[in-house]
């Protein structure tokens, strides 16, 4: 057994518990409250009209085509 991989600690010592600061606890509570509130108040996704949906789909397809072209050119270059 290697002495470098084992940690020797007296059996009576325990890990020191660090207290969380008041500002951290308040920030965590506010953040969790905002998450819960937002999930309770936004039940339905907003509807998107057909023109916007088509435009977003075209933009996504264009981005994917550009990525495919770039990856193919990088593959050929490399």
Image (tube, rainbow, N blue to C red):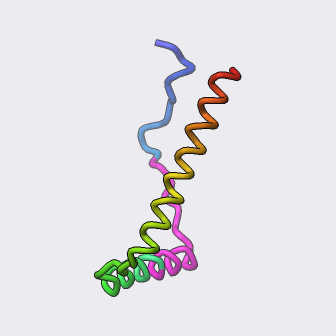
Q: Would you place residue 19 above or below residue 12 in this image?
A: below
- Quadrant showing the C terminus: top right
Comparing 73 with 16, the one in front is: 73
Q: Is residue 49 left or right of residue 8?
A: left
Give coordinates of residue 27: x percent, y percent.
53, 78
Q: Would you place residue 1 above or below residue 23 in this image?
A: above
Comparing 7 with 24, the one in front is: 24
Q: Residue at x 57, y 78 (%)?
A: 23
Q: Residue at x 49, y 52 (%)?
A: 61
Comparing 45 with 29, the one in front is: 45
Q: Residue at x 39, y 78 (%)?
A: 49
Q: Is residue 62 magenta?
A: no
Q: Would you place residue 18 above or below residue 61 in this image?
A: below
The magenta span reads 14-30
Give coordinates of residue 31: x percent, y percent.
47, 77
Q: Would you place residue 14 above or below residue 42 in this image?
A: above
């Amino acid at each position: 057994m290697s002495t470098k991989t084992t940690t020797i600690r007296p059996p009576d010592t325990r890990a020191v518990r660090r207290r969380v600061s008041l500002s951290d606890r308040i920030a965590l509570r506010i953040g969790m409250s905002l998450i819960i509130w937002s999930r309770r108040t936004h039940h339905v996704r907003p509807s998107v009209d057909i023109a916007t949906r088509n435009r977003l789909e075209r933009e996504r397809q264009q981005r994917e085509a550009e990525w495919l072209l770039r990856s193919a050119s990088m593959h050929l270059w490399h």
